[in-house]
C-alpha cells in the first residue's frame, strides 16, 4: 500500500515542458540573461494567452496598461 501512495514519479510532463521552453529562450546567443529576466520570459511564454487577453481587454476599454 505504501508503494502505491508514496511512489515517486519517474518523470513529470510539466517540468519537462518548462525545461523545453527554457532551452528555447536561454540559448548560446542569449547566455547572459539573468535569472530574473529569464524567469519573466518563461512566465510570459507559458501564460501568453492570459496576459494577451488582459492587455487587449484593457486596451479596448481605453485603460492604461501597467507592466512591472
Image (cartoon, rainbow, N blue to C red):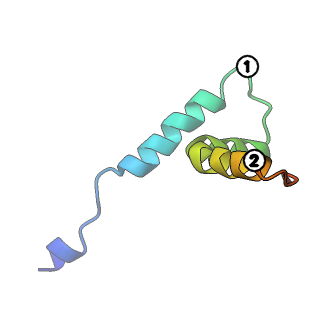
Outermost bottom residue: 1
Mark 1: which secondary structure? loop
Residue bearing mark 2: 60
Q: Residues within 10 Å of mark 1 (few under 14, many from 20)?
A: few
Q: Position of residue 66 (x, y in %)?
A: 86, 54
Quarter where residue 31 is shown:
top right
Q: Is residue 62 above or below residue 22?
A: below
Q: Is residue 37 left or right of residue 21?
A: right
Q: Residues within 10 Å of mark 2 (few under 14, many from 20)?
A: few
CB contact under 8 Å: marks 2 and 1:
no
Q: Is residue 54 left or right of residue 37?
A: left
Outermost left residue: 1
Q: Is residue 66 above or below residue 49?
A: below
Q: Residue at x 78, y 35 (%)?
A: 33
Q: Residue at x 66, y 49 (%)?
A: 51
Residue bearing mark 1: 29
Q: Tell how many labels.
A: 2
- Work out which quarter of the rendered image holds the C terminus and state it: bottom right
Q: Position of residue 15 (x, y in %)?
A: 45, 49
Pick the front one: 48 or 30: 48
Q: Residue at x 54, y 36 (%)?
A: 21
Q: Position of residue 7 (x, y in %)?
A: 23, 68
Pick the front one: 38 or 57: 57
Amino acid at each position: 500500500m505504501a508503494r502505491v501512495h508514496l511512489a515517486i514519479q519517474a518523470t513529470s510532463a510539466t517540468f519537462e515542458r518548462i525545461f523545453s521552453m527554457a532551452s528555447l529562450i536561454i540559448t548560446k546567443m542569449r547566455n547572459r540573461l539573468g535569472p530574473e529576466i529569464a524567469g519573466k520570459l518563461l512566465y510570459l511564454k507559458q501564460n501568453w494567452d492570459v496576459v494577451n487577453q488582459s492587455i487587449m481587454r484593457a486596451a479596448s476599454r481605453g485603460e492604461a496598461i501597467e507592466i512591472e
